[in-house]
Amino acid sequence: MKPASKFPLHQGWQVMLADFGISPSELLRIAKLPADLFTREGAMLTSSEYFRFWNSLDQLVGDRDIALCFADSFCIEAFDPPIFASLCSPNFKVALMRLQQFKPLIAPLKLEIETDQELTRLSLQPLDKQQRLCRSLVLMEAVFF
């Protein structure tokens, strides 16, 4: 499956950020994204914008364990269809396979899965090898799993 060239930014981010004391407008300013991005219906980010968003969030979050706070705020209705499909899987193995297949449609990321009889290893890589995964993004993905 060909990865997407743009990735969704949910309007719910604005509320979650404000709930945790992070200024949505400050985040967008630091990320050099349009000031009205959170109010746009169907807002999409390019790969570089996606990583600027996360790196800016990482900068604003500092040492706080905000990933756990975000996990408390997540609701199924806010998830992308590929995430919802994985949540509706009959077991964790199928869920991971669905996420692996559809992850490049919702984020510029590749999920790699290694399994043996005792262990399943997950790794997340940016599709663009020039990008680096920041702490907040990695923690959010870990909390999600």
Image: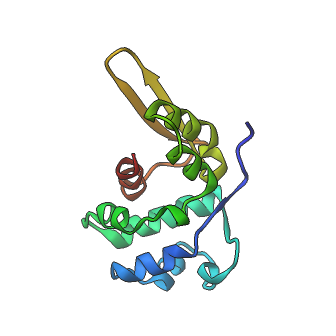
Q: Is residue 82 left or right of residue 76?
A: right
Q: Which image quarter holds the N terminus?
A: top right
Q: Residue furthest top?
A: 117
102 above or below 26? above
* Colour scheme in use: rainbow
Query: Depth check: 88 or 73 in front?
Result: 88
Q: In x, y percent, where is residue 55?
A: 46, 62
Query: Depth check: 109 or 15 in front?
Result: 15
Residue at point 60% right, 42% down? 127
Q: In x, y percent, where is residue 74?
A: 43, 65
Which corner quadrant of the image does residue 56 belong to?
bottom left
37 above or below 94? below
Asked if residue 143 shows in the view, the reply is yes
Residue at point 38% right, 80% down? 22
Q: Is residue 50 left or right of residue 42?
A: left
71 above or below 33? above
Q: In x, y percent, where is residue 87?
A: 50, 47
Q: Residue furthest front?
A: 90
Q: Is residue 116 left or right of residue 109?
A: left
Residue at point 46% right, 65% down? 75
Asked if residue 30 shows in the view, the reply is no
Q: Which image quarter holds the C terminus?
A: top left
Q: In x, y percent, where is residue 52?
A: 53, 64
